[in-house]
Structure formats: C-alpha cells, structure tokens
Image (cartoon, rainbow, N blue to C red):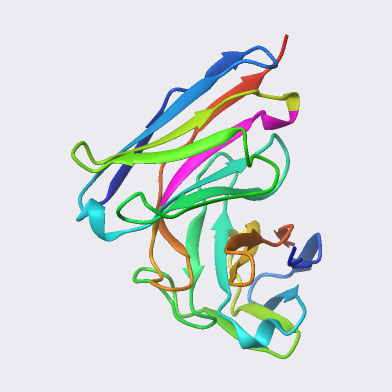
Amino acid sequence: SYVLTQPPSVSVAPGKTARITCGGNNIGTTSVHWYQQKPGQAPVLVIYYNADRPSGIPERFSGSNSENTATLTISRVEAGDEADYYCQLWDSSSDHRVFGGGTKLTVL
Amino acid sequence: EVQLLESGGGLVQPGGSLRLSCAASGFIYTNYDMTWVRQAPGKGLEWVSVTDGGGVRTYYADSVKGRFTISRDNSKNTLYLQMNSLKDEDTAVYYCAKDGCSGTSCWDHWGQGTLVTVSS
C-alpha cells in the first residue's frame, strides 16, 4: 500500500517560516490534503487539492506538491500554530485513503 | 452549520462487538461520501472506512476488513460502523468525517470523536 513519510517533528521560532514535508512515490501526480490537530481536538482541514485553503484558514498557510514531495508551509508562525500536522491522499490504485505519520510542530 | 455527532463508544472485551453512530445535520447528507477515521492513544490518524452517498460503494483499511462494516441510513442522516471481533489494537478515538473534495477524498468537517476501549 501507498506510504507517506513525514518528519516526526519540526521546530521554528515565532515569526519564522515552517515547512513540513510529506514524501511519497510520485506524489506530485495526485492531490494532497493537510490537517492540523491540536491536543484533545478533532483534526481541521487546512489545505486541500495541494494548495487550496478552506474558508477561515489564514493565508499564512500554503501548500505545494511536486515530484516526490508535498510541502505545507506556514509563514510568520504564531504560538497558536503549535499542533500535529498530517498529510493525506487518496490512493486510486487501491481506493484506500492514506495518512502520513504526522509531524509535531513546536514553536520555540 | 454542519454538525457531526458520534456516539456508541465504550469499553468492550476482546472478541466483542460495538456499533458506532454518527448523526449528521446542516448539509444534504445523501450528496456526500462519509468516512470513519480513528486515532489510537498517542498515535497518528488512521483511515478506517468510507461509503459513498448512496451507501453502495464501501472501502476498508486492511486492518479492519472483514471485521468492520460501514453503512448509512439516509432517511435518518446517520452513519454507522459495526465493529466485530474487536482486538486490543482497535482501541482508539473514532471520528466520522464528511467528504469535502469530490473525487480525491478530503474531509472538511469532523465529529468530536467517540472513544472505543478494547480490554479485558
């Protein structure tokens, strides 16, 4: 089955830019979605179709996807962005939906 | 306003069964695929199962295939997950989620989750 690989943790200072990667074989040929999950809460969709933002998600959140890596970029990081982030896609070959292992974003 | 409310979680012994429900409101329920996602304590998200708007096409993660059954009652705007032959590793918070990306499966609304604990 399709595997998505994320770094377990990323640390960034407030006001700086955080980049969270999601690796997969030819991932650039499909749509990747990103979720933010804070402790004790349900996940929230922050990026869909690689780079689109749902209403209510700040413009500081952006996404890209090319070749073997999708990336979630958070600009001007704030303390409130500290959370776990998951990438996800639909594997059309199996009709399975797949999550990456998740990345814990720490704001220093 | 879209609302998803799960229920039915609890403590069950290994080998036992449980049925989860997810009551939906605030959108045209039959127009959307619905999904179950779970999260074991301290672990990441795991997709469990999905059904299309008519409840005809269903898909399962390998870890639950043959033991879990997803279904929906569109007259009641309710999604179900029948879980049989439960194992310790099925212990998790179970979320229902509404599809938000036609054709590529993303989830734009989630319930608050219901905890299932499998233990003797």
Report the span colored magenta: B89-97
At 63% from the left edge and 87% from the top edge, which residue is drawn?
Answer: A29
Residue B96 appears left or right of B85: left
The structure residue drawn at horizontal position 46% and vertical position 25%, both measured from the top left corner, is B19
The answer to whether residue A4 is seen in the rendering is: yes
Q: Nearer the viewer, residue A19 or A34?
A: A34
Horizontal side, residue B33 vs residue A68: left or right: left
Q: Is residue B111 left or right of residue A12?
A: left
Does A84 appear in magenta?
no
Q: Quadrant of the C terminus of chain B?
A: top right
State whether residue A29 is above or below residue B16: below
Given residues B86 and B38, the one toward you in this image is B86
Q: Can you see residue A17?
A: no
Residue at 61 percent across and 14 percent down: it is B12
Residue A74 appears in which quarter of the rendering?
Answer: bottom right
The residue sitting at the top extreme is B120
**In this rendering, position of residue A52 left or right of residue B75:** right
Q: Position of residue B42 (x, y in %)?
A: 73, 39
